[in-house]
Amino acid sequence: MTLDTTPAIGRSDAPAPARPQPGRRSRSAAIAPLLATDGYKVGHIRQYPPGTTRVYSNFTNRGSRIPGIDAVVHFGLQAYLQESLMDAFAPFFAAEEDEVAGAYQRIMDAYLGPGAVGTDHIRALHRLGYLPLRFCAVPEGTRVPLRVPSFTIENTLPEFFWLVNYIESALSAAVWHPSTTATIALEYRRLFDAAALRTTGTTAGVAFQGHDFSFRGQTSLASAAMSGAAHLLSFVGTDSIPAIDAVETYYDGDNGLIAASVPATEHSVMMAGGQDGEVSTFRRLLTEVYPAGIVSVVSDTWDLWNVLTATLPMLRAEILGREGKLVIRPDSGDPVDILCGTLSAEEIAARRAAGEEVAPEEMGVVPLLWEEFGGTVTAQGYRVLNPHVGAIYGDSITLQRAEAIIDRLAAKGFASTNVVFGIGSFTYQYVTRDTFSSAIKATWAEVDGAGRDMLKDPVTDSGTKTSATGRLAVLPGEDGGMVLVERATPEQEARSLLQPIWEDGRFLRRQSFAEVRAVLAAQA
């Protein structure tokens, strides 16, 4: 029996490719934004006191589970307003009223029972043609102290009081994660800046020292994009290309360099070349595929130490003859031990003085690269690798591990800038809304024409969930910080750092990404 190995594509007897089938959807795009809420909220319109005409809520980060962080970077609101309150609602307002009201009624009847939720308020919103809401916020990029609101939200027309907290779930989900990522990224940047100044006297290049590796570990493409954008407030390096699209879509303007990366291999590339062909794979990458520029090569598919002590010495001429840098990327093991080695400089010297052998793993990646390729010494007395070689590590990096790597390198006489850190989902996705106790709470309402200060203060709570009360203002403090004013007067609200940015379906103020970066840099 002879098998026909001709590829199916192009064969005359090949079956026609299957046509893509339209996706099955349980709802239309027209009512999608109305369903972006928690189920218990749809009935709140009937639960507020009769005569309610206004509801006023705020977003506040109330605490920190990360020691040393007492302020959270505000980021992500502008993207939410554009995507979820403008773009997402456009099909709703463009559709026929009976169509959207009928679709909404059908789903609610099945969900809560016939008649549990009406559609008069949905029809009224559709006839209005825009969302009657006002958002007041500090500029994005602002480091907002804990227990001080980043923004407020209220309705602008009396009959739509129900809308304020109706959108809370989606709003909270859209803002807490980018703000959390931006805050943690800033901590990395501060760590790297301080170390670079201490060991080299300059922060040049630090913007590329934190590289976003978190895409595949995020919960969705959307979270990867906005978390990735938040990372880029403090760094330029990223492998999350969707973050670039998010920046250009929601924070457009003259943003300069948004992000950058370098060619890099993965384990499948190295494995395809075979273990016996690893040297050939390195040589082909360096001389044929990337004869110039930076290229990062994952080097522990089999034996990292053999790569450092055998493969690279064999390729020394090719490496030093390139106009570029070969970056060695370990991808497993304890990152502190792998990069820095397990022995101190003194222990290595003593072992060698005694004629004893020092194993590669006891040396570490950076010291081994130094011994093979050399480098320079900074005015501060720290060694910097030859510019033709470098190292990056991106597995399970945390702030604590990054600091430990920097400290051990310094103890062995190496500058912090010898290593690039791949910051992944262990940092940016291993967080929750409770990392900074982020929450949206109502603090004021108007009922029968009179304002009511509202306060949540559970006796069973530690105090974290105690809310502010009344209308709120955020004023500059004497120390340059921010002070929350509760039960604020109209005059205090007028002077507040919380200023209107979006009202009745349109932006009153937008920021480019460069502007957000500048706001953050001015405080960092």
Image (cartoon, rainbow, N blue to C red):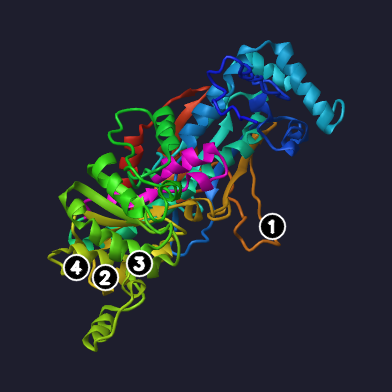
Q: Secondary structure at mark 4?
A: loop
Left/right placement of residue 488 relative to residue 509 reads right
**Marks 4 and 1: CB-CB under 8 Å?**
no
Disc 2: which residue: 410
10 Å crowding of disc 4: few (<14), some (14-19), many (20+): some
Image-quadrant location for residue 402: bottom left
Please say whether residue 214 is one of the residues in the magenta stretch. yes
3 or 1: tag closer to the N-terminus:
3
3 or 2: tag closer to the N-terminus:
3
C-alpha gap between disc 3 and disc 1: 44 Å
Q: Secondary structure at mark 2?
A: helix
Q: Quadrant of the N terminus?
A: top right
Q: Is residue 144 visible?
A: no
Q: Is 410 located above or below residue 302 in the figure? A: below
**Marks 3 and 1: CB-CB under 8 Å?**
no
C-alpha gap between disc 1 and disc 2: 49 Å
Direction bottom: furthest residue? 354
Which label lies toward us, 3 or 1? 3
10 Å crowding of disc 1: few (<14), some (14-19), many (20+): few
| Mark 2 residue type | Ala
The magenta segment: 203-231
| Mark 4 residue type | Tyr
| Mark 3 residue type | Ile
